[in-house]
Image (spheres, rainbow, N blue to C red):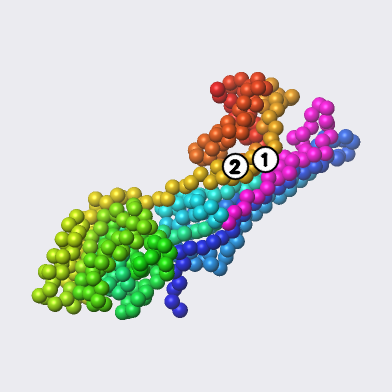
Amino acid sequence: MANTFVDRAVIFVRAGKGGDGHVSFRRELYVPNGGPDGGDGGKGGDVIFTIDKGLNTLMDFKNIRKYKAGDGEEGGKRKQHGKNGKDIVIKVPPGTVIKDFETGKVIIDMADRTEPFVLFEGGRGGKGNQHYATSTMQAPRYAQPGQSAIEKKLVLELKMIADVGLVGFPSVGKSTLLSKVSNARPKIADYHFTTLSPNLGVVGLSGGRGFVMADIPGIIEGAAEGVGLGFDFLRHIERTRILLHVIDAASVEGRDPIEDIETINGELRSYSEALAARPTIIVANKLDVLPAEERDEVISKIKQAYPDTPVMAISAATGEGVKELLEAAYEMIQTAPDDVMEFSPELILEEYAARETELPYTVEKSEDEEGVYLVEGPRIEKMLGYTNLEDERGFKFFQDFMVKNGIIEELKSLGIQEGDTVRLYGWSFEYIE
């Protein structure tokens, strides 16, 4: 059975809920009125994405669509801490972009990440009643509930990573070229849309040099508007560093090669101006079926139409001109931008925060500790649930949240001074003016 290439999938992920704090009291012989000893709940499991270089499709996500981390366990008596929930680790191929299903915004681009990415942290475990004993309440019958789980529907998109992308109409010879110059073995036939999935091949040159080449399925007019499989095809060109625009110089199917170039360039511009500006070599293929007396005229016309773009004539079938093309492509790669194009995350945190603006919160000065201020409430819990405070971007968002929601102003009205402590559900921060 033929391998199926899958480059888009929709999945549902859920972090683990935090375990509830426990309410219990010490009961031992000779200790008739023991104090509270309810333990804390365990932390919920995280949702973690990681790159697996052994994967090259999103096929696994067609079979399994729901991914759930483990919930934290409830705390126990005798101050026993509940077990933490198990993390869920989701492996994706290099080049995967993770988006919010509802908004289409990019959450993270796993282009070439070497470190795992924690998408959602599990809910914080609730505190047991041992933490709530005071001089006026020595037997608290209250424990903190565990933080609720974050869940979200995601879109995974695979945008292939390659040095060179072959683009052009169907049947212009891209698959033939790739099969002749690399270790790839794409299916080849003389009808449209033979190639319905990108093929990757490693091209080896002398002196241990080489590069990765991708045969992108044939583009048709309207691809940028999603006609046919247009979006699916164009998605993969975005990662490539240079393009080889293959045309049928012999007009085997009666099409004008210059019109073909214009059509494909128009599709690239419609989809992305950055993509249209990618360094390009025009590859005039099928010299073997172009009469010798017509070659100079045909190639000359193409060069005149595109004086700023290198034009190279080849025959993928016979190998004529192919070595020179590969050397030119290699040289162009050396001067092309060497960073993998990444898709910048859009601040979806802002969107999450906007949904919680109606939730209450409280800002209070601690009665038990000098110089300590407590910030609590559902709005704060929700914010902490979707914010990674150990990440620079997340911490900046947290600071902005405190200002925009008026929390800093309330702390100032209560008399907070530089060096005082602000506590939010297990987090402690030193206040700085």
Q: Main secondary structure of the magenta part?
A: loop
Q: Distance between the residues labelled 1 and 2?
A: 10 Å
Kind of residue at disc 2? Ala
Does residue 65 lie above or below 316 as drawn? Answer: above
Q: Kindly identify the amino acid type of the residue bearing the numbered disc 1.
A: Glu
**Would you say residue 145 sits in the magenta stretch?**
yes
Percent x, y of residue 305: 19, 61
Seen from the viewer's position, the closer of residues 1 and 156 is 156
Give 78 or 209, whichever is nearer the viewer.
209
SS state under label 2: helix
Please give the range of residues in magenta.
Answer: 125-153
Q: In this view, does 375 lie to the left or right of 76?
A: left
Residue depicted at x 83% and y 31%: 138
The quadrant in which the C terminus is found is top right
Q: In this view, does 21 lie above or below 282?
A: above
Residue at position x 43%, y 76% from top? 2
Q: Position of residue 242 (x, y in %)?
A: 28, 57
Instruction: Determine which residue is flagged by label 2.
Output: 353
Mark 2 residue crowding within 10 angstroms, few (<14) / some (14–19) / many (20+): some
Q: Mark 1 points at which residue?
A: 358
Name the quadrant containing residue 372: top right
Helix, strand or loop at disc 1?
loop
